[in-house]
Amino acid sequence: MKLPNRLLTSSALLLVVASNVCAEVKITPSIYSRGGMTRSTDLKSRHTLDNGDDRKDFNLGAWGDESNTISDDLTELTAKFDLNSNFYYTYGVDINGNRRFLEGNETADHKSLDERLNFLTFKDNDFSLWVGQNAYRGDGDYLTRNFPFDEHNMMGGGVRVEKMGPINIEFAYGEVTQGVTDPKVVNLFINKIEYPLTNGKLKTNLELHRINATSDTNESKTFLAGVQLQRWGIKLLDGNFYHIMLINYSNGYVYGGQMQSGYNEISKDLDESKILAQWAGDWKWANEKALYFTVKYQEHSGNNDNQKWSFVDYYVRPVKNVTPNTAIGLDLAQRFITKENKDSNKSWMENGTNSRVALMASYHLKDKMFELPSVSLFAGRIFKDKPTQFFTDKPSAREEDFLRLNYEVAF
């Protein structure tokens, strides 16, 4: 979201007032940054949108969800202000444009600062409350850099109560504005229930969406429900195994995120639905070797029997250290189309089986192969069912070699 003056003003007033009532403000800054260079002069193929905007898209992915191998350049700056023992203020911006949080037809211009976080939190023992602009999301996936279970960058507020018997429970309400020519306000009501386990947790997610648009036809109501099981610290063949299993279901149009509707049609009379099931995790042996994996199934249904589309994605990365700071590995991603409707007039669905394989070498600044900052080199080849323009200065082809130097930093 672009910096809204009204929110900045109100948040600044809250900060000033809170600062006056506490003796000391503790500031904790953090930074996350990623990016890279490629063998070709231009990795990013340009596509002109219907509204005339020009945006940069990577075109070396095995599918639309790019990985931490080849992903959008991004720098996130965050500062947390501890106002006193109960109040916390969080502010964060993106540099280079985090496309995940763009509004409607906005494009990442890779120059401006985009507001990402701007909210105040009150916490008292097992009770907490937040209000403002929040990237409200759960556990992410390491390989794909996605948040498949829940993610909303919304203006609103929420409350969380822990240890309510055996569970933790939270509620949130907010809104997201989508679109420019036909702006749509998405109202969101969210409920989460979390059941802590020994070395893990079981979590449910319930969402109700209402899209209000200037056109009555483009109004819709959406129901979304999911359950997630997360476990860590499992001993398996002398290694530590961590994994997340989840399943999400939606009925109605979903505006964005991993549950975004595949047919992208908004109407109160349509009956779009989607199922997403995913298993992801890592298997690590001390500071010696690791196996990262993500397997995901998606099924999209449109407003009639002819609109059916489903596929399976898998992503695997085994790595082994050579020295305390360096590691080598294999990066493999592939998509299999399991159901494809030729009558949907959605050309991007057809012949969508793709794969990418690469050898990799990484250098970690710390003497731990799994921690950041890191620099990685990927050399590989991508294969697609239909001709694709991988680079802007080359004609379309079904196969392409690539060499990429990638960095990732977190402090």
Image (cartoon, helix red, strand yellow):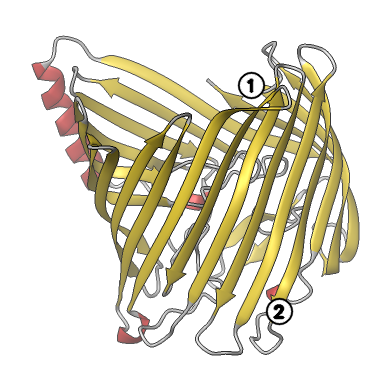
Q: Looking at this view, is 330 or 395 the one in front?
A: 330
Q: Residue at x 50, y 51 (%)?
A: 100
Q: Amino acid at mark 2?
A: Glu
How many marks the image carries: the answer is: 2
- Does 106 sit above or below residue 299? above
- Residue 320 in sight in this render: yes
Query: Residue 54 sits in which quadrant?
Result: bottom right
Q: Which residue is mark 2?
A: 340
Residue 93: percent from the left, percent from the top?
A: 42, 36
Q: Residues within 10 Å of mark 1 (few under 14, many from 20)?
A: some
Q: In this rendering, would 400 be left or right of 44?
A: right
Q: Residues within 10 Å of mark 2 (few under 14, many from 20)?
A: some
Q: In this rendering, would 214 be left or right of 302?
A: left
Q: Residue at x 71, y 86 (%)?
A: 342
Q: In this rendering, would 10 be left or right of 286?
A: left
Of label 1 and label 2, which has the lower sequence position?
A: 2
Residue 307: percent from the left, percent from the top?
A: 60, 84
- Does 154 sit above or below residue 164? below
- Does 2 sit above or below residue 346? above
SS category of the residue bearing label 2 = strand
How far is mark 1 from mark 2, CA to CA? 40 Å
Residue 184: percent from the left, percent from the top?
A: 34, 70
- Residue 101 in sight in this render: no
Disc number for residue 9: none
Q: Residue at x 74, y 56 (%)?
A: 59
Q: In this rendering, would 354 be left or right of 32?
A: right
Q: Which residue is mark 1?
A: 371
Query: Residue 262 sits in which quadrant?
Result: bottom right
